[in-house]
Amino acid sequence: ARAWHLERRPNGMPVHDDFALKDIALPDLADGQIRVANRWLSVDPYMRGRMNDVKSYVPPFQLGEPMQGGAIGEVVESKADGFAKGDLVQHMEGWRDEAVVDTATGMAQKLPPLDVPAQAFLGQLGMPGLTGYFGLLEVAGAKKGDTVFVSAAAGAVGSTVVQVAKAKGMTVIGSAGGKEKCDWVRSLGADHMIDYKSGTPVVKALMEAAPDGIDVYFDNVGGDHLDAALAVANQHARFAICGMIDIYNTSEPTELRYLPRVIGARIRIQGFIVSDYLARAEEFYRDMGTMLQSGQLKREETVVEGLDNMPDAFLGLFSGKNMGKMLVKV
Ligand code: NDP
């Protein structure tokens, strides 16, 4: 088998030489293990954090070791009860074409019986979808009638937030880089789109798009987007802080000119991690699964072909190469 290894810790934006694709020897199966031929691999912005040697909510990747991440594959050999050859499973031994996975630790799960393509469980029905769904409805407590602003709205999490918000009766303002993405998110139902690459400062564009303010901000970006949301937030607005991709590759501090509005506007700012809501996956599959199977929600993915090209897929997240979920097809 072959796996991508972290060769070097990046400084700023990662480069190709930080990664190395190497052969790995996989062991014979022990009891409780399965051998999985990976079909789909996930690249996610949080992996950038794991390339740094810092303590965080997920441990750092180890230098010279295979990297990990979400994956979906087919069981080709099983010594585990409940798993048979041919089963499709999701697990965390990604960044490689084949994996031996311990099932006892709950690290491998059979795909839920929903009538959607397998790779949806890495996107809208997987970690990013769960993040968008509970981040919007629980962390921000967004409700029918709210005006919601969401950044990185054409991405995996953002495009879920846009569609769930519309399905639940909210007004949605999104931001994304470029006209094509903005048009696409509008086609998903967004009421207004801001092209943050158009040259107009985000705060100015948001003031125009939201003359009556915003009740909820779903933050995927941080920086000027967070500042703009602070500037236009209504009384008792709720901010779900999901990610700050604008600062993942820099050590420059963010200037938040409008931060003092937190006080007068009584803004509630709440960060969260998707794992906070894993226990509610059943509820999520029911609601999102129904909306996806009925066609009410649209799925989009950007597929990079081949394990060899996986670093390109990952790096593409930071220059906006994806619409919807970025995936690698092995
Ligand atoms: P996306 O599919 O949204 O991909 C990243 C997108 O971010 C790109 O397509 C790009 O779109 C945009 N982007 C990249 N750099 C910048 C920048 N400097 N300024 C503005 N936009 C930028 O990724 P995900 O949906 O997987 O993740 C979205 C966010 O959610 C990330 O911040 C991620 O870390 C966070 N997250 C947090 C989780 C949690 O548990 N808290 C779980 C999952 C994700 P464009 O072309 O529009 O610039």
Image (tube, rainbow, N blue to C red):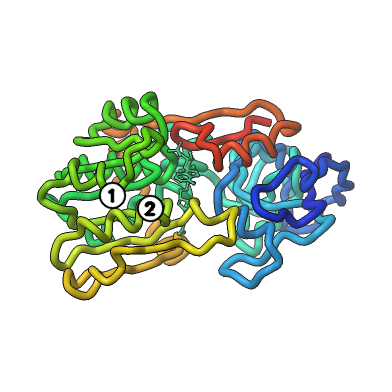
- Foreground residue among 293 and 18: 18
Q: Quadrant of the N terminus?
A: top right
Specify whether 193 is left or right of 146: right
- Residue 184 place in picture, x, y as percent: 34, 27
Q: Residue at x 65, y 37 (%)?
A: 74
Which residue is at 24% across, 63% downward? 238
Q: Which mark is residue 203?
A: 1
Q: Nearer the viewer, residue 156 or 23?
A: 156
Q: Position of residue 63 (x, y in %)?
A: 81, 59
Q: 154 above or below 58?
A: above
Q: Is residue 100 above or below residue 174?
A: below
Q: Amino acid at mark 1?
A: Val
> At x 57% / y 28%, what residue is drawn?
303
Q: Where is mark 2, residue-wise?
A: 224
Identify which residue is drawn at 42% across, 56% down. Answer: 223
Between 236 and 309, which is closer to the camera in this rendering? 236
Residues at circles 1 and 2 in contact by the CB criterion of under 8 Å: yes
Instruction: Tell me which corner region of the image, top left, top right, bottom left or bottom right, holds residue 258.
Output: bottom left
Secondary element type, mark 1: helix
Residue type, numbered disc 2: Asp
Residue at the limit of the structure toward the bottom, as seen here: 263
Q: Residues within 10 Å of mark 2 (few under 14, many from 20)?
A: some
Q: Is residue 77 something that shows in the picture?
A: no
Q: Percent x, y for residue 119?
A: 52, 35
**As rendered, which of 122 and 47 lies closer to the eye?**
47
Is 288 located above or below residue 189 in the figure? below
Q: CA distance from mark 1 to mark 2?
A: 7 Å
Q: Quadrant of residue 188?
A: top left
